[in-house]
Amino acid sequence: MQPSSQRKNRPRSTPTPSGKRTTITEHDIFGIFEPLSRHAQLTTKQLVAFDRRYASKTRNRLTDLFHEEGAWLERLSEEIKFANFLFMDEMYRLGDDARALLEARGVTPPHPWVRTTRIGGNSTTPSRIIRLAHDHMASEIALDIEIGARATPEMNFRNHIQIIEAAPKRTRTFPNPLRIAVPQIPGAPKWIEPDALFAINDRYFAIEADMGTESIETIIKSKIVAYREIIASYVIDEHFGIDNLRVLFVTTGEARMRNMMAAVADIADQGRSRMFGFACRPDLGDLARAPAPTGGMFAHPWERVGHDPLQLGKE
């Protein structure tokens, strides 16, 4: 076995030393494979932040698992070559063997909707780079909140797979259970699908990651109307079997966040709403320079229109 000092500096392009086989561990399953089953792709930074092992250990495991015989991990760099690839964090996707292992172990259910409801990967923008940036942002927000909740005593965090598994049987038969039909009302789309869905204790939250590419007047307002309507008409109760929902908008510019809040004020009764929380994260706007999740967004006070800020663990 190589000394740890040499392993720590082994390039990610270098396979496991000849003759050594990688044994899949519980840490690999729950620190790498399981989060990748819920996200379309995650960067090395994100996986290192999520995994409970030392950072150098997780980085080495990612390299080992990618090069190990079998389809454990896939790298987007094998498929996409970025102009500034030397400065890009490696992005990983779950391999077929890892997916089969999770299903065999009962870690994730063997249903087609598990793949269609992954965080990221569902954007329809024509630009693949913008899609990846949006997907990374959505995953960053969701992971950051999950890490913070996991580190806080008495916080019961549930991801979207757990929520769907507890939903009414009819919902679990849909190809994409996160896609919610909106009653026909003026200004609302036919469907609304959050970028991520999670629960903390008995409160449910949807995430909307905003890269500033959508019109506030035509797109953002329609989303606000749709979310309000699925609550007011009890669609959310029938679809997920839940009786509450908060929607968290995260955007990359202060002025845009204020304009989104103004859009809520225009729509909400008396210009006030407890349902929507807002945060500004300029550092998530650049895919190449985005920081690792820290758990800070769980404790972050989310601004609201006409009400005190929302704190996820307290309301």
Image (spheres, helix red, strand yellow):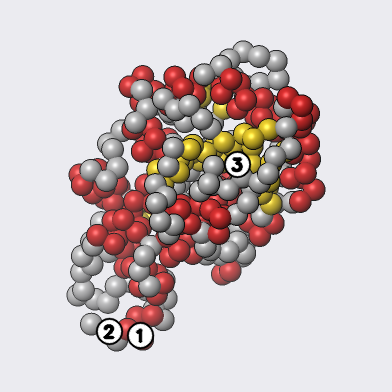
Q: CA distance from mark 2 to mark 3?
A: 46 Å
- Nearer the observer, 242 or 11: 242
Q: CA distance from mark 3 to mark 1?
A: 44 Å
Instruction: Name the residue carrying label 2.
Output: 2
Q: Is residue 95 above or below residue 290?
A: above
Mark 2 closeness class: few <14, some 14–19, many ≥20 residues within 10 Å? few
Determine the secondary structure under disc 1.
Answer: helix
The percent coordinates of residue 34 (x first, y second) are 34, 51
The amino acid marked with disc number 3 is Leu
- Quarter of the image where the N terminus is located: bottom left
Res 173 visible: no
| Quadrant hosting residue 127 | top right
Q: How many numbered marks have been drawn onto this rendered protein structure?
A: 3
Instruction: Name the residue carrying label 1.
Output: 6
Q: Earlier in the sequence, mark 3 or mark 1?
A: 1
In percent of the image, x 73 and y 32: which residue is there?
272
Q: Earlier in the sequence, mark 2 or mark 3?
A: 2
Determine the secondary structure under disc 3.
Answer: strand
Determine the secondary structure under disc 2.
Answer: loop
The amino acid marked with disc number 1 is Gln
In percent of the image, x 34 and y 31: which residue is there?
166
Q: Is residue 251 above or below residue 66?
A: above
